[in-house]
Image (spheres, rainbow, N blue to C red):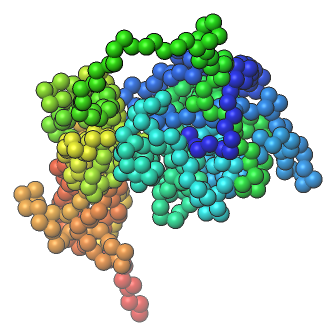
Amino acid sequence: MAAHFGRRLRKGAATTAAAAAAVAALSASQAPGVTTDPDKPAATGTSAAAPEDGAEQNATGNSPYYTDLPPLNSPSPSPSSTAGTPVTQGDTEAGIPATVLDAYKRAEAELRSAKPGCNLPWELLAAIGKVESGQARGGRVDANGDTLSPILGPQLDGNGFALIRDTDNGAYDGNSLYDQAVGPMQFIPSTWAWAGRDGNGDGKKDPNNIYDAALAAGHYLCRYGWDLSVQADLDKAILSYNNSQDYLNTVLSWLEYYRRGTHSIPDGTGRLPSSRSDEPDRTSPAPSPEKPGGSTPKPEQPSSPPKPAEPSSPSTPSTPATPTDTVDHLADAGTAAELSAMAGDTFAKKISTRAETKAGKSVGKVRVRFTLIGDTDATFAGGESVATVATDSSGVAVAPVLKAGRKTGDFTVRATVVGRPAVKGLDYTATVTARAADALARAGEAPLTCTAGGEFADQVTVQATYQGAVADGVAATATLVKSADDTTVNDKGPYFKDADGTAVRTLTDLVTDANGRITLPTLYADDTEGTFLLRIVTTGGATLTVELTVTAAATPSPSPTASATS
């Protein structure tokens, strides 16, 4: 949650009741069709069920947020003097600082291209930005999108908040003991480490920049293949940002409010929120120190002077050990000995890691970070190279699905305990192999024949499969060979032509298409008659030999000779 905005306003009982009523009213009047999941536990200021078992730590670490609600009367667009350009007028809350608004819209545009199935509306980013930081403290940003001063939530030291020990050595939040949520979208450092993006193209990923933070929030909300046009997925995405039912209701209220109309206002002129989720309710006066009877009794007089207490050595108050503190090492939890997938395919096996104490006892509720290391374009589901997963009751964290990229070779998946750099990481080796075929067949059965000196009427088309399925993207080579036993290149017979028209008898860099097919270029014949062989080989060892026949050219019949006349 952002730092305090000016003087903190304490919520009284009436304020709390009004806020609850406003949420209900907004759900009914401003958000038709927007409902909460009846299967989720009802809560007031409490955490709702996690959006997914084993999902990584939420974006904000469940930091405090602003609870101000939008006006019950939503803004409505009114016609402007320019035809076809609606302009929203009216309530001040509908105004969004210009640079902040631009960042939200740019993030939506990029996600529309990068993850079109997500259907991310920029109004959702605006709703979260309002709740997390009051639109970057009312738009106190420069033209580049950098906040004019840091926006930091309270340190997450377990004192009324989650306990998240330092994960970034203070690089983002300046705190080397505990993490704090950072920037206008309030990312905790451990989440920013993998979710951070460069939204303004300056080569940096800065959580204090609204363009970077908005784009990161968009990608964060669009992971797991969620479709935000579906209410259930929208709820999951918002709860993954801050796991509270009240938070969900508040964000949905602002989302619907902004969907009904907004307008741009100058940077730095936005209205600042006043109420926070961590403010105590002042519903009753503090108890009076006065004793019953209205007088303060005199202290009892001891019958004899008390004996001086024995001196004791000073003690240092200890912080209760967390599950993370008890982890001694990480152990494999049944991952396949070999992690391998073809380029572009999904790895069939997930990585499972168990957190254990020195005695080998499993430790639950520990965050394990999985990081891809090496020259690879493989990613976890959602396109990320880092994923953080909480261990379950058996101490096991299961990494998200791995998807191989196009680069082949080995890379490492390293599992580490978040907040415990002293615990040695556990490495898994993963391999991406070239796409392969194990069978080749010719498409078509017509004999391939040609007369000497001519060209073949039909082109050769082959179909590649792997384990019975279409094998797309598989590399192949076609060679005109001397014989079935001698696979060296033949210097006679049929040939292909290169771009310059020169005869070539070997074709490389062939690749099967999306249907697993390759159609070879036109074949030509020299003046050599006979039967010739075309050999096609793919990665993976699939081989097909095609027979080509060259017949003698037709002998032209002699033209009649004119007889001599006398």
- The residue at the point 30 percent across, 77 percent down is 502
Residue 68 falls left or right of residue 231:
right
Q: Can residue 316 be seen in this view?
A: yes
> For the C terminus, which image quadrant?
bottom left
Q: Where is residue 439 in the image (x, y as percent from the top left)?
A: 22, 43
Position above or below: 102 against 393: below
The foreground one among 360 and 98 is 360
Which residue does the image show at 35% across and 63% down from the upper left? 522
Q: Viewed as shown, does residue 415 lie left or right of 205?
A: left
State the residue lying farthest toward the top.
293
Query: Residue 282 appears in which quarter of the rendering?
Result: top right
- Viewer-proximal residue among 125 and 70: 70
Give the farthest residue toward the right.
Answer: 81
Q: Residue at the spot x=23%, y=59% of the render?
A: 477
Q: Where is residue 177 in the image (x, y as percent from the top left)?
A: 37, 44
Q: For this rendering, which residue is in front, 235 or 189? A: 189
